[in-house]
Amino acid sequence: MKSIIVLVAIVGIAAAGRPDTERVITTFKQIAPLYKPTIQEAQTIINAIKSNATNQLAELHLAIIGKKEGYVQQVIGREDYILQQISTQRSADQVCMSFVRTSSEMNVNLAGVSFTNCINAADEAIKTKLEEYYGYMGDYEQKVSLLRLLDVFQGQNVFHSPQPIIARLNAKMEALRNSSSLITENDAQFMINQVRNDMQTIQLAYSNCMGVAYGLLGQGLNMCEMQMTMICGAVLSCDIGKGMGNSCADVNMKLLVCVVLLLAGGSYAGRPGAQEVIEKFRAIVPGYLAAMGKDQQQLVTLERQGTDAIAQFHSDIMLAKETFVLSITGQEDTLIGLINAQNRSIADGQCMQFVSTALNETVNVIGVAYTKCINAADESLSSNISSYYGTIGELEQAVVDVRLLDVFRGDNVFYTPDSIVAKLRQKESELNANNSTTVAGEMREEIAAFQADLAKIRERYIGCMTVAEMSFRSYMELARQQLAVICGALLENAPNDVAA
C-alpha cells in the first residue's frame, strides 16, 4: 500500500514538476515533420525560377546569333557586290582597283572587329547579370537552407525557462506552415520578370551595337564604290552608294537586286568560315541547354539529399535531447519521491527542503549545460550548411555559366573564323564527353562529406550531453548521501519502493 501511495505521489510530481519542459520536446516533435516539406516547396519554387532563367538565357544566345547571322550575310553580300564590280571592270585602272579590293577587305575585317566588340559587350552583360541574379537567388537559398530550428534554445534553459523556448517553437511552426514566408509567388514572378527584362535589354543593346557597326561598314564600302568610279575609272553595273542618305532598308533592297544580278557567275567573297561559325554556334546551343538541364537536375537532387540529411539530423538531435531530458527529470522525480516518502518525525524536514532546493538549482545548471551543447550543435550545423549549399552554388554557377559567346573573344568572324569554329568544336567535344559525370562525382563526394559532418556534430552533441548527465548522476549520489548523513533520511528499500 505504501508503494502505491508513493507511486501516485511521484506521478503527480512528474506531471506537475516540469510539464513545460516536456512541452518543449512535444512541440519540437510537431515541428520536425513540417521542416522537410516546407524547405522542399521553397526549393522547388527557386529551382523553377532558375529553370526559367536557363531557358531565357538559351533563347538570348539564339537571338544574338540569329541577329549576327543576318548582319554577317548582309556584309558578305556587300563584299560580294564590290568583288563582282571589280571583276567585271576591263578599262579601269587595275592597280587602283586592287587597292580598292584590299580596302574593301579591310573594311569587312574592321566590321568583324566591331561585331566582336558588340558580342563581347553582350557576353560581359550576361556574365554581370548572372552574377547579380545568382547573388539574389543565393539570398533566398541561404534563407531557406539556414532555416534553423535549434536556435530556439539560445539564451534559454529547457528546465528553468522552457516557456520562451515553446514560444519560439510556436513561431517557427507558424512560419513553416506558411511557406510563403520563405519565398512568395510575387518574389518568384519578380525574378522571372527581372530576368526577362535584363535579357531583352541585353538583346536590344546588342542589336543597336550591330546596327551601328553595320552602318560604319556601309560608309566604308560606299567609299570604295566612289573610289572605283572617281579615281579608278570604273563603270558600276549598279550604284549602291549613290544617295548615301537613303535608309538602310533602301540600300539593302538595292543591294539584294544587284547581288542577284551580279552573282550569276558565283560568289567571290570566299568567306564560308563566317557562315560555318553561325551554323556551328546554332547547333551547339540546344545541346548546352540539355546538358545544363541535366546538371541542374542533379544539383536539385543534391539539394534534396542535403535537406533530407538536415531533417534527419534534427530528428536525431531531438531524440537524443528527449532521452537526456527524460533522464534528468526521471532522476529528479525519483529523488523528490524519496524525500516525500520520508517520515518527518525521523528525517529533518528543513534539511530535506535545502536538498530539494539544491536539486532544483542543479537541474537548472544542467539545463545551462544542455543549452551550451545544443548551441554548439546549432552553430556547427549552420556552418556546415553554409559550406554545403555554398558548394552547390559554386557548382551551379559553373554549370549555368554558358558563355558560348566567349568564343568570339580575340577573334573576328570574318578574319579568323577558323579559330572561332575550333573553339566551338572544343565546347562541343566537352559537351559530348558528358561533363555532368564530373558534377555527379562531386555531388557524391559533397553529400557523403556533409553527412559525415552531421554525424560528427551529432556525436559531439551526444558526448557533450553525456558529460552533463554524468555530472548530474554524481550530484544525485551526493544528494542521497546528504539526505542520509545530514538529514537523517532512511534510504533502505526507498528506491525500490519508488520504482514500484
Image: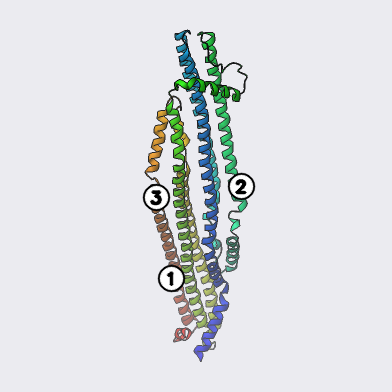
Mark 3: few, some, or many residues within 10 Å (few <14, many ≥20)? some
Task: Return the mark for residue 442.
Answer: 3
- Dot 1 lies on which element? helix
Task: Specify whether residue 149 is in view.
Answer: no
- In the displayed structure, would residue 345 be above or below residue 297? below
**Residue 280 falls in image quadrant:** top left
Residue 424 spot, x, y in % from top left:
41, 35
Q: Nearer the viewer, residue 400 or 252?
A: 252
Residue 143 spot, x, y in % from top left:
55, 53
Residue 325 spot, x, y in % from top left:
49, 71
Q: Residue at x 46, y 63 (%)?
A: 312
Q: Earlier in the sequence, mark 3 or mark 2?
A: 2
- The residue pinned by badge 2 equals 190
Task: Return the mark for residue 470.
Answer: 1
Q: Nearer the viewer, residue 245 or 58?
A: 245
- In the displayed structure, would residue 72 be above or below residue 49? above
Mark 2: few, some, or many residues within 10 Å (few <14, many ≥20)? few
* Cα distance in 3D space between marks 2 and 1: 55 Å
- Mark 3 touches mark 1? (CB < 8 Å): no
